[in-house]
Each structure stands twice: as C-alpha cells, then as structure tokens.
Image (cartoon, grey):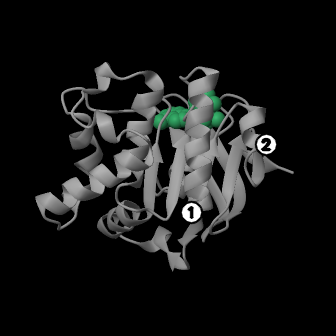
Amino acid sequence: MIKLNKVSKTYRTDKVETLALKDVDLHVQKGEFLAMMGPSGCGKSTLLNLIGLLDRPGQGSIEVEGLPVTRYKDSQVARLRNQTFGFIFQSFHLIPDLRVIDNVELPLLYRSMSAGERRRLAREALEKVGLGARMDHYPNQLSGGQQQRVAIARAIVGRPQVLLADEPTGNLDSKMGEEVMDILLRLNAEGTTVVMVTHDEREARRTNRIVRVFDGQLVA
Ligand SMILES: Nc1ncnc2c1ncn2[C@@H]1O[C@H](COP(=O)(O)OP(=O)(O)OP(=O)(O)O)[C@@H](O)[C@H]1O
C-alpha cells in the first residue's frame, strides 16, 4: 500500500549536514502491523514522517496505493495525508483548553461535514477506545493512558486506512502501555494498517513484522 523506493533524507542546518536516511526501500503492506525499532537517532521518526507524507524525501520516491505522491503539489499531498493517515505521538499532543470531544473532532474540521455529524463520529471514536463517559472532561483531568486513548480517538475519527504511531507507549507505565497496545491491535484486526515506532521488544513481538533501522538504513 505504501512503497518507499531508494529514499534518502538529509537535514541541513547552517553548520551541520545529517544524512538521516540512506537508500531505504520499504513496502508497507495493507492490513499489516509493522514495528520499527532501532537506537536513538537512527532515523525512525524521519522514516515515519516520510511514510505519513509529513515530509518529503531528498532523493527517491514514495507511492501511496500506486499514486506517485513525490511528484504531487503540497496541497495535493496535504489532502491525501488527511484522508489516509492518522497520527499518534509519544506526548499525546492534545489541546489543553479543549474538551476531550472537541479535541477528537479537530481533524474533521477540514472536511465538509455538519457539526452534528462531526459530533457523532467523535463520540463513536471515543466509545471505541473506552472513553465514552469522559467526553466533557479536559485532558488534564485524565490519566496519561486515558490521554493517549483520546489521541487515538482523534487519530481514528476520520477513519484513516493507516495509523502511524511514534512511541505511543513511551510516556506510559507498563499497564497503560499494554492497554494502548491492545487498542492498536484491535484496530489492526479490524483492518487498519498500523506502523509503530517502539523501543519495547515485547510490544514489537505482538506485531506482524519488525523492521530494524540502524544509521539511516534498514537492517535485515
Ligand atoms: N529537523 C531536523 N533538523 C536537523 N537534524 C535532524 C532533524 N530531525 C532529525 N534530525 C537528525 O536526523 C537523525 C535521525 O533523527 P530521527 O529523529 O529520525 O531519529 P530517531 O531514530 O527517531 O531517534 P529517537 O529514537 O531518539 O527519537 C538524527 O541524527 C537527528 O539528530
């Protein structure tokens, strides 16, 4: 479903050039749960950002469902990204001044949809992660695990085909981490493709496939 062909990425600042990824070939299959592992700074987040069309490669090309997205204009890429991907981050990235339900509705504001329809979908997404009773709370009234579940609801509310998770359990204790993994596994079983960065071997073993990154390259 997503193909990276000989993808490289270099970050340039005034003084330093960092080759973050070098000639990466990767095929993310529809319906799989892929774990990405590797030491700090090896390029995992860079790879996830390229897969999710948050950034463009320096060299190489990316295809999403056969579409040559590397040749698309920014506005076309943004539309495809919004339709195809949901994102989950280590530090939740919820907006503290918005109630849980309003946080979850946010990705739908960019779609032409009535307010009632937005609310219905957000409620459904929250029920899916077991937080139907917390809709009117503010993020700081919830535990870390609950906040991450709100972030998952926000990621799935637009019914994306692919969920991209960058160390989603990194800030959680093991019990909350396991609950988040259970939800990701359930969403995957229901058909969502999941790509997750993790440092936890036990979590990675629960997925279909582990890709190891080292110094900007994939290792067998
Ligand atoms: N915006 C940026 N500007 C400059 N260099 C960057 C930028 N983002 C990442 N890098 C560099 O690119 C390399 C890969 O970074 P990346 O964040 O992809 O690694 P990572 O494997 O996700 O690390 P971690 O596990 O610590 O999150 C690192 O050397 C990093 O310092």
Which quarter of the image is occupied by the N terminus? bottom right
Q: From the viewer's perspective, is residue 76 above or below residue 193?
A: below
Label 2 vs 1, first from the N-terminus? 1
The circle drawn on residue 205 is 2
Q: Amino acid at mark 2?
A: Arg
Q: Is residue 78 left or right of residue 115?
A: right
Q: From the viewer's perspective, is residue 181 above or below residue 174?
A: below
Disc 1 residue lies near ligand 1 with CB under 8 A: no
Name the residue that disc number 1 marks. Answer: 190
10 Å neighbourhood of mark 1: few (<14), some, or many (≥20)?
few
Q: Residue furthest front?
A: 133
Q: How far from the left and from the top, in percent, is residue 187?
A: 55, 55
Q: How far from the left and from the top, in percent, is residue 122?
A: 28, 51
Q: Amino acid at mark 1?
A: Glu
Q: Quadrant of residue 17?
A: top right
- For the point 64% across and 23% down, which residue is it? 174
The circle drawn on residue 98 is none
Q: Is residue 22 left or right of residue 137?
A: right
Q: From the viewer's perspective, is residue 86 above or below residue 30?
A: above
Q: How far from the left and from the top, in percent, is residue 129?
A: 44, 44
In which of the image's four quarters is ligand 1 placed? Answer: top right
Q: From the viewer's perspective, is residue 139 above or below residue 4?
A: above
Q: Is residue 119 visible?
A: yes
- For the point 66% across and 36% down, which residue is it? 198
Q: How many marks?
A: 2
Q: Is residue 180 left or right of residue 219?
A: left
The one nearer the camera, 58 or 93, is 93
Q: CA distance from mark 2 to mark 1?
A: 19 Å
Q: Is residue 122 left or right of residue 47?
A: left
Q: Quadrant of residue 37?
A: top right
The one nearer the camera, 180 or 18, is 180
Q: Quadrant of residue 141?
A: top left
